[in-house]
Image: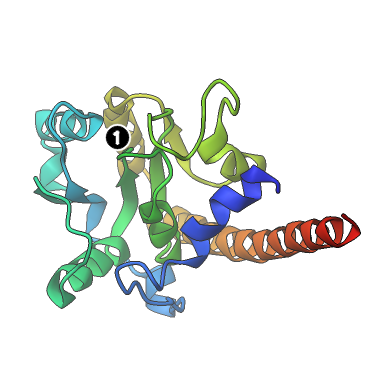
Amino acid sequence: MNKTYFLAYPAVFQLSRYRNFPVVEASWSMLHNERPYLCNFLGTVYENSSRQALMNILKQDGNDKLCWVSAREQWQPQETNESLKNYQDALLQSDLTLCPVGVNTECYRIYEACSYGSIPVVEDVMTAGICGNASVYPSAPLQLLKSMDAPFIFIKNWNELPAVLEKEKTLILQEKVQRRKMLLHWYQHFKTELKMRFTNVLESSFLMNNKG
């Protein structure tokens, strides 16, 4: 089976099963309203991780005051109703969603941000997790997203973030609205295309097994 499609499928299509994340319908206000926060990050911060570096960088320039930031020290597999609502509100009210690596490079946060029209800022580095082997698949975790021209911001180091945020501050609302529309359109196309590819891979595999 084609590992590129197989690995990407669960992260996109199991959102509703993971932490009870809802299916989000785009609204006029989601597309057109001014969002009060420049960016958001709600998540676990592991010691000596790039997430810790991210928090320090946000504080240096005072950008943590312009972003919705809520860090915790211990990972929680299930969200409470309150924490899930806070997370959804943060996505809806932020222009950018910061997506640092965790155990793996790719994470649900990327696709959850897309659902709300919040541009993912993705840390583009390989981790030691199970979502790819750098010696075999050099860009495995994000390969499919890049091949389909995901309208994300990819960065190699969080030291690049201040420049990203400074540029963000210069954008007018009309530019942000167009960008949200483009992101939501791309995301819908991405899901449709991925379903089709995944189905084709399954059918091909099924036919090959039957011939065997």
The residue that disc 1 covers is: 166
Asked whether 93 or 190 is in front, the reply is 190
State the image coordinates of residue 98 (x, y, percent, origin top left): 31, 45
State the image coordinates of residue 199 (x, y, percent, origin top left): 73, 65
Q: Which of the 4 quarters of the picture holds residue 126? A: top left
The residue lying furthest to the front in this view is 212
The residue lying furthest to the top in this view is 135
Left or right for 115, reference 182:
left
Q: Label 1: few (<14), some or many (≥20) within 10 Å? A: few
State the image coordinates of residue 58 (x, y, percent, origin top left): 16, 35
Residue at image position (33%, 25%) is 160
Q: Callout 1: helix, strand or loop? A: helix
Left or right for 189, reference 83:
right
Quadrant including the C terminus: bottom right
Q: Which of the 4 quarters of the picture holds residue 128? A: top left
**Amino acid marked by disc 1:** Glu
Residue at image position (56%, 57%) is 9
Q: Which of the 4 quarters of the picture holds residue 36? A: bottom left
